[in-house]
Image (tube, rainbow, N blue to C red):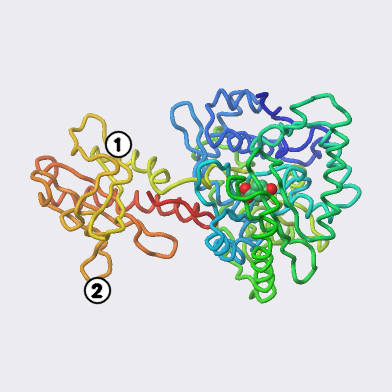
């Protein structure tokens, strides 16, 4: 399949888009391009692949990646640049400002449980739709999209609903996009359009498709729902209903029930599930009506000082204008959905002129939009900066790189475990071994009784007790093995896993375990928790 031309991807603007304004910050545009390319590549690209994909010089790629690594958005593993969970703070800023996931996701999840089908929420993104929530049922025979994925409006059920609100200008840009990209190559997450695949140069077929979408839009306008009968791929069917903003009566987002032809036809979706979807949507609209005002969180602290210090330390390798520009996106959030230039400057600690140029750059890139109230707001496209690949993660995947660093540092084996459903045994979920060290041979998946293990004591505290800050076991389960474990907490403060280091009695005394291993374990646990809390703010993923 031909690769999308990096210069024409839907997430970086059509080729006809205006040239960058003179005040746009070039390093910030390059940094954003690197994040886009990494996202499209599912989160990993070698530096040389990045060089090819962006068309940038290798030295520029190196400096951008070094800067993104310093910000904690990317890590380097050999020759690969890999997106890290921290980059999700950009998408989180958009989702928090939007508030819809916080207000509506519980209803969407409830509906998915009730129907035993996947339920999603999508917003309009120019002539596409972008997912802001997914309550996915794991099944064979179904492709499911991730939070942040962008689909062409005409191949979805929400598309015609959003198109009922399009202006002539928006219809015009949709037609232009259809002409320049008939096969949807600019939407890397959807299979190429089957119609166009059948006959590339069939103008009549093209016209039919345009008419079909106009017809579906007219239908959506009169019925207030829409269907997707296998427009994305064979077997995939969906029914959608708009969730209206109670203040403006405009569509805030669209709720979708997604199924497979092995369970439902498009017609049976409409007959059996549409009424229940409508009921859920009307409850969602009540929730929006009754929502209390947002609680503005604190603006990011001390970022401008931080970028200055990093520049001092890294010199040429640190692209300060990129780091400063990226902090502008994190100024937005819950209760901070629309900010004036002055507010952005104040929240980030940037000079007004610097904040202004960053906003001009983002407006050009379609990541920020001016509002009628002389303020700026983030657009859904911010989700294309790393969110989709990272939204399908797991605790072991989040922990793995931190555990590898720890194992290297302490030269001991480190493991992660959770409590099983039985409640009296633990299961190993991740492991990192130090090179050249003879290690206790326990593989991922192993179950052990909780009582004799350091991690078990963290996960099953004695009745009535709060989980201990750490637990040490001395040759209890196995002779010669000494282990020390610390808790991993979720966003609410609950202990959800334990991290340990295991050593041999001959290698470390009990005192050494407490004075050397414990501080390293606590610091690693805190790094894992930071990533976990960022990644789990708007997405659900397994702990195993
Ligand atoms: C989805 O949530 O995966 C979905 C929603 C609407 C569609 C297709 C897929 O039309």
The spot of residue 403 in percent (x, y) is 34, 42
- Camera-side residue of 431 and 525: 431
Q: Secondary structure at mark 1?
A: helix
- Camera-side residue of 82 and 211: 211
User: Which of the labelled discs sits on residue 10, or is there none?
Assistant: none
Q: Is residue 200 above or below residue 369?
A: above
Q: Is residue 236 left or right of residue 470?
A: right
Q: Is residue 303 left or right of residue 154?
A: left
Q: Residue at x 22, y 48 (%)?
A: 516
Q: Secondary structure at mark 2?
A: loop
Q: Residue at x 81, y 63 (%)?
A: 373
Q: Is mark 2 within 8 Å of ligand 1?
A: no
Q: Nearer the viewer, mark 2 or mark 1?
A: 2
Instruction: Quickly name the residue at label 1.
Output: 408
Image quadrant in which the N terminus is located: top right
Instruction: Quickly name the residue at label 2.
Output: 464
Dividing the picture into quadrants, the one containing residue 288 is bottom right
Q: Residue at x 30, y 36 (%)?
A: 408
């Amino acid at each position: 399949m031909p690769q999308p031309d990096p210069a024409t991807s839907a997430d970086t603007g059509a080729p006809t888009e205006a040239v960058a304004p003179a005040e746009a910050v070039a390093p910030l545009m390059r940094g954003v391009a690197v994040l886009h390319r990494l996202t499209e590549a599912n989160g990993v690209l070698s530096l040389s692949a990045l060089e090819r994909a962006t068309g940038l010089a290798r030295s520029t790629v190196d400096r951008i990646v070094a800067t993104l690594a310093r910000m904690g958005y990317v890590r380097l593993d050999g020759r690969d640049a890999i997106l890290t969970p921290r980059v999700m703070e950009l998408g989180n800023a958009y989702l928090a400002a939007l508030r819809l996931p916080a207000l509506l996701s519980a209803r969407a999840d409830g509906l998915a449980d009730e129907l035993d089908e996947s339920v999603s929420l999508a917003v309009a993104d120019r002539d596409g739709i972008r997912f802001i929530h997914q309550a996915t049922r794991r099944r064979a025979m179904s492709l499911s999209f991730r939070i942040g994925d962008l689909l062409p409006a005409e191949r979805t059920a929400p598309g015609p609903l959003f198109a009922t609100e399009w202006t002539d200008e928006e219809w015009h840009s949709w037609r232009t996009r259809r002409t320049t990209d008939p096969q949807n190559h600019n939407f890397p997450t959807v299979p190429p359009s089957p119609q166009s695949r059948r006959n590339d140069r069939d103008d009549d077929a093209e016209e039919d498709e345009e008419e079909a979408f106009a017809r579906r839009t007219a239908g959506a306008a009169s019925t207030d729902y829409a269907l997707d009968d296998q427009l994305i791929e064979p077997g995939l069917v969906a029914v959608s209903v708009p969730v209206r903003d109670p203040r403006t009566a405009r569509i805030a987002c669209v709720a979708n029930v997604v199924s497979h032809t092995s369970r439902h036809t498009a017609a049976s979706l409409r007959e059996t599930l549409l009424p229940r979807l409508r009921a859920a949507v009307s409850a969602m609209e009540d929730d929006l009506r009754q929502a209390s005002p947002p609680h503005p969180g604190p603006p990011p602290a001390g970022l401008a000082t931080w970028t200055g210090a990093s520049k001092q330390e890294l010199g040429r390798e640190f692209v300060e204008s990129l780091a400063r520009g990226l902090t502008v996106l994190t100024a937005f959030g819950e209760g901070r959905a629309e900010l004036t230039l002055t507010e952005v400057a104040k929240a980030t600690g940037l000079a007004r002129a610097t904040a202004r140029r960053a906003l001009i750059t983002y407006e050009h890139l379609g990541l920020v939009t001016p509002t009628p109230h002389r303020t700026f707001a983030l657009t859904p496209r911010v989700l294309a900066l790393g969110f989709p690949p990272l939204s399908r993660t797991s605790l072991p995947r989040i922990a793995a790189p931190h555990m590898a660093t720890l194992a290297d540092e302490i030269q001991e084996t480190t493991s992660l475990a959770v409590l099983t459903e039985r409640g009296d045994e633990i299961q190993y979920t991740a492991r990192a071994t130090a090179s050249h060290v003879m290690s206790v041979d326990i593989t991922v998946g192993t179950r052990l009784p909780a009582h004799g293990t350091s991690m078990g004591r963290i996960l099953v505290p004695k009745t009535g007790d709060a989980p201990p800050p750490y637990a040490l076991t001395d040759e209890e389960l196995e002779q010669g093995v000494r282990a020390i474990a610390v808790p991993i907490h979720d966003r609410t403060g609950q202990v959800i896993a334990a991290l340990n280091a295991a050593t041999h009695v001959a290698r470390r005394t009990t005192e050494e375990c407490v004075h050397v291993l414990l501080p390293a374990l606590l610091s690693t646990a805190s790094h894992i928790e930071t990533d976990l809390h960022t990644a789990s703010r708007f997405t659900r993923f397994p702990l195993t």
